[in-house]
Amino acid sequence: MNLIRAIAILFLLGISPASANQREPAPPPQDPSVATIRGDIVSGLMSNRWSRVMFIDGRFLGGELETCDRHDLAPGAHSIVVAHRDDLFPLRVDAEAGDAFVVKWDQNDNVYVESATTGKKVFAKPVDPYDPANTYTEPLAGSETAVVKAQPKIVDIFLEGLTEEGRVEIASIDGKSPGSKVRSIRVPSGPRALAFYMNFYLGASGGGGPVYGWVLVPLLLDAKPGEVYALNYDRPKKVIGTRTISVWIENESTGEVMTNRAHAIFNINDRFGGFSYNEASSFPNKKGQLKRSAPKPKLWCERD
């Protein structure tokens, strides 16, 4: 009976069972000298559930929101931000040549990274921010630690005087949360997968209301013992209508740039860096029927 009902709904939507089962071809095997990571897609009758890799070590990954794109990872540690449903999650992945990782989720929407070759979880990110598994434990001061700082710049605002221009905080160390509104924290030396939360007032909307943009930017820092590092950024700007920000980490005493410069697109309201996660796949037309775009083959990694 469920199968008959599903076929009937597909018919009303203008999708034949045959076209619904079409699938795009899989890509060629990956380069064995690198690792790869991709999101996941689970088919649904009206909409799919998905995860997506958004950033790797500060590099924003454009393209479709639902995608099977594989992204190369050089052997070593990586700081990654992934999207699932309406949230972003910072992760750390340690890759070896030949690894193939998939970002998945469980029935409670806890996000994890699975090895496609072994089926084992290599990183788990509970959705509950207060889960003890989510908590970063700061090491004691010592010779094998470094300090990371992040704070907004002080600007002179008309009628307000000198004030902080927004929120700039340390959001994650190696995929674990240090707490709320953290601006300075000690970390072990070595490769550290860091993520920073930034929120700025960007102007007024067409209706006159304020527009705030936020980003969660991952950067990979090779922390040296005894050093102090500071997040730096270029003030937010518009690029052909898209609001962006450049972010990096530098050595506080020497000013040396220690990481890639991340060029992030602001998330505004219900949009992930220009991708809307609330856009419905179908809308009622004047006749009360469902209006859909032409059916597309399933993606090669899409699961039923």
Image: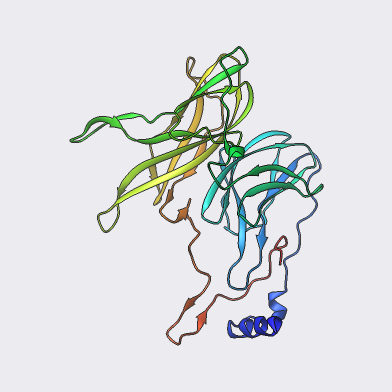
Q: Nearer the viewer, residue 134 or 182?
A: 134
Query: Residue 3 is drawn in which quadrant?
Result: bottom right
Q: Nearer the viewer, residue 201 or 295?
A: 201
- Residue at the limit of the structure toward the top, as seen here: 143
Residue at the spot 66% in from the left edge and 47% down from the top edge: 112
Q: In the image, is residue 231 above or below residue 140? A: below
Q: Position of residue 78 (x, y in %)?
A: 65, 36
In the picture, measured across the screen, residue 91 lies left or right of residue 257, that is right
In the picture, measured across the screen, residue 50 lies left or right of residue 207, that is right
Residue at the spot 73% in from the left edge and 47% down from the top edge: 114
Q: In the image, is residue 159 above or below residue 42? A: above
Q: Position of residue 85 (x, y in %)?
A: 55, 56
Q: Position of residue 241 (x, y in %)?
A: 39, 52
In the picture, measured across the screen, residue 150 lies left or right of residue 119, that is left
- Where's the C terminus, which quadrant? bottom right
Q: Nearer the viewer, residue 1 or 12?
A: 1
- Residue at the limit of the structure toward the left, as seen here: 159
- Where's the N terminus, which quadrant? bottom right
Q: Position of residue 60 (x, y in %)?
A: 55, 44
Name the colour scheme. Answer: rainbow
Residue at the spot 57% in from the left edge and 18% down from the top edge: 140
In the picture, measured across the screen, residue 184 lies left or right of residue 163, that is right
The mark total stands at: 0
